[in-house]
């Protein structure tokens, strides 16, 4: 490819490229930010500026940029067998090996893997699997899937419908039928002044109310992210997940856990289901499975649903990229590096607690109403008044102001409304955590200045 300067890239981009989750008119006026290179936890833009990637790309580049083990695994597999499909009773070594490796990492009875190309495709697969499963059990009326408002489960029709993002539903008449939502366990945003555990129980019990309202005989499954990521790193009160699991069991509703962000060490466990004591029937993973180097997703299927599917004849579902051999080889290399370098243990015992301590120190800033986090996920809430915790008016765009100041400081931090969130690569060092927190504090100071 010919080398293009920044202006040329921006011109081509503005002329021909429609971006995901982007206001295209604003982008065309301003010109896209051009990222050219990555190494470790850093990115370099086209102006040569070094930026600390506090979001690990989109919550995925867990091993950081430039890992030779992953690059070499892709190269070797491209030479050996760059593509073959898994349809019609065929397999290849990378898919079979990775399925077995994942089965060894997964909690409980999740021993069967169905490969996809993304997190969204995992959730589409879940919808088709659970409905097919219940139909096989002679219960075809069990079709409804219950999710949460402000959940994120992807951008396909089923993913966006299962998700609870109002602006996504508003475009294109979503959600699809038989996908309904209960309230999220967001204590800072929706439970101020209540006891967190009481609030968590009340939010979980909405599941029971919804099941009874719909009729238990119609409900197929409940789906949730252990920690809501894109919704703003919402960490549920301790009371929440045990109650959800109890209710699912009481009404024989399948429990689907979307670990697309939480999986592969993000919370200090291979899967957050371990942390929350969850025994899901189905578990979705993507992103960190290859450290984001190449697209891959997988749905792990528990014994009960797997037996139903195995006995159910041909399952008419699959993707050209299901279990792509190069992606599987990279995932295998990624998991091996994680094991060799004890990445999960490091997040649990060392760098996770260190980041949480340093992040909590931002709580004294006049703009910060709350800090929270788990493993290498963290959030802070921007408030106009630290005593009453009142928010800024929406028109002030406080989160976006702060995000821009972060970029100026050389830090990627994401804004969800006025919630600032981070999810850095799991290989971040203590010095780099210090740099992240120092830059975040400077950005907060500048935000305060801009907004006052
Ligand atoms: N599920 C969760 C929890 C996610 O955070 C995401 C993406 O951020 C998805 C699903 C969708 O994954 P993808 O963008 O790979 O389709």
Image (cartoon, rainbow, N blue to C red):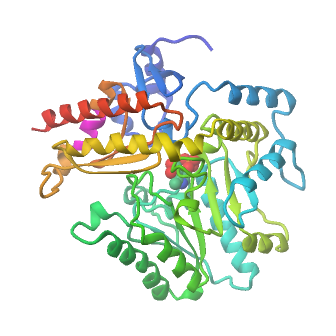
Q: Residue at x 38, y 70 (%)?
A: 183
The relative height of residue 358 versus residue 67 in the rendered view (above or below) is below
Magenta region, residue range: 397-404
Residue 52: image location, x then y, percent: 42, 27
Q: Nearer the viewer, residue 323 or 313?
A: 323
Q: Which residue in the rendered view is the most extreme toward the left?
A: 452
The mark tally for this picture is: 0
Q: Is residue 29 left or right of residue 249?
A: left
Q: Is residue 347 left or right of residue 254?
A: left
Residue 14: image location, x then y, percent: 43, 26
* Secondary structure character of the magenta stretch overall: helix
Quarter assignment of residue 126: bottom right
Residue 102: image location, x then y, percent: 73, 52
Q: Nearer the viewer, residue 291 or 22?
A: 291
- Quarter of the image with the N terminus is top right
Q: Is residue 42 left or right of residue 335?
A: left
Residue 88: image location, x then y, percent: 88, 55
Magenta span includes 403: yes
The relative height of residue 41 versus residue 353 in the rendered view (above or below) is above
Quarter assignment of residue 288: top right
């Amino acid at each position: 490819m010919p080398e293009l300067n920044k202006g040329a890239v921006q011109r081509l981009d503005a002329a021909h490229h429609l971006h995901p989750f982007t206001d295209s008119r604003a982008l065309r006026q301003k010109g896209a930010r051009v990222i050219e290179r990555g190494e470790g936890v850093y990115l370099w833009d086209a102006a040569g500026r070094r930026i600390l990637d506090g979001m690990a790309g989109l919550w995925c580049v867990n091993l950081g940029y430039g890992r030779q083990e992953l690059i070499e695994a892709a190269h070797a597999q491209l030479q050996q067998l760059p593509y073959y499909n898994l349809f019609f009773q065929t397999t290849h070594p990378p898919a079979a090996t990775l399925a077995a490796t994942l089965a060894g990492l997964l909690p409980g009875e999740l021993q069967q893997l169905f490969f996809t190309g993304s997190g969204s495709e995992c959730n589409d697969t879940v919808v088709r699997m659970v409905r097919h499963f219940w139909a096989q059990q002679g219960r075809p009326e069990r079709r409804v899937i219950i999710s949460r408002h402000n959940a994120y489960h992807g951008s396909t029709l089923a993913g966006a419908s299962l998700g609870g993002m109002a602006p996504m539903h508003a475009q294109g008449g979503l959600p699809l039928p038989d996908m309904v939502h209960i309230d999220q366990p967001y204590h800072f945003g929706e439970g101020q002044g209540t006891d967190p555990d009481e609030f968590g129980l009340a939010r979980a019990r909405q599941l029971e109310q919804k099941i009874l309202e719909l009729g238990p005989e119609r409900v197929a499954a409940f789906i949730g992210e252990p920690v809501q990521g894109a919704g703003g790193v919402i960490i549920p009160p301790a009371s929440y997940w045990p109650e959800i699991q109890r209710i699912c069991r009481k009404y024989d509703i399948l429990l689907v856990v979307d670990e697309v962000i939480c999986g592969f060490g993000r919370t200090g466990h291979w899967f957050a289901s371990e942390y929350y004591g969850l025994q899901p029937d189905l578990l979705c993973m993507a992103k960190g499975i290859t450290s984001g180097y190449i697209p891959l997703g997988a749905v792990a299927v528990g014994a009960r649903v797997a037996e139903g599917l195995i006995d159910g004849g041909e399952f008419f579902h699959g993707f050209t990229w299901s279990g792509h051999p190069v992606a599987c080889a990279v995932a295998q290399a990624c998991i091996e590096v994680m094991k060799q370098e004890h990445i999960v243990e490091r997040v649990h015992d060392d760098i996770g607690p260190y980041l949480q301590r340093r992040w909590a120190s931002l709580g004294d800033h006049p703009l910060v109403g709350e800090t929270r986090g788990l493993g290498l996920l963290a959030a802070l809430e921007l408030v106009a008044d630290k005593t009453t915790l009142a928010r800024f008016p929406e028109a002030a765009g406080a989160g976006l102001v702060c995000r821009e100041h972060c970029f100026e400081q050389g830090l990627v931090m994401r804004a969800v409304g006025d919630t600032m969130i981070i999810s850095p690569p799991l290989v971040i060092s203590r010095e780099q955590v210090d740099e992240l927190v120092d830059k975040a504090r400077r950005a907060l100071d500048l935000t305060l200045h801009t907004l006052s």
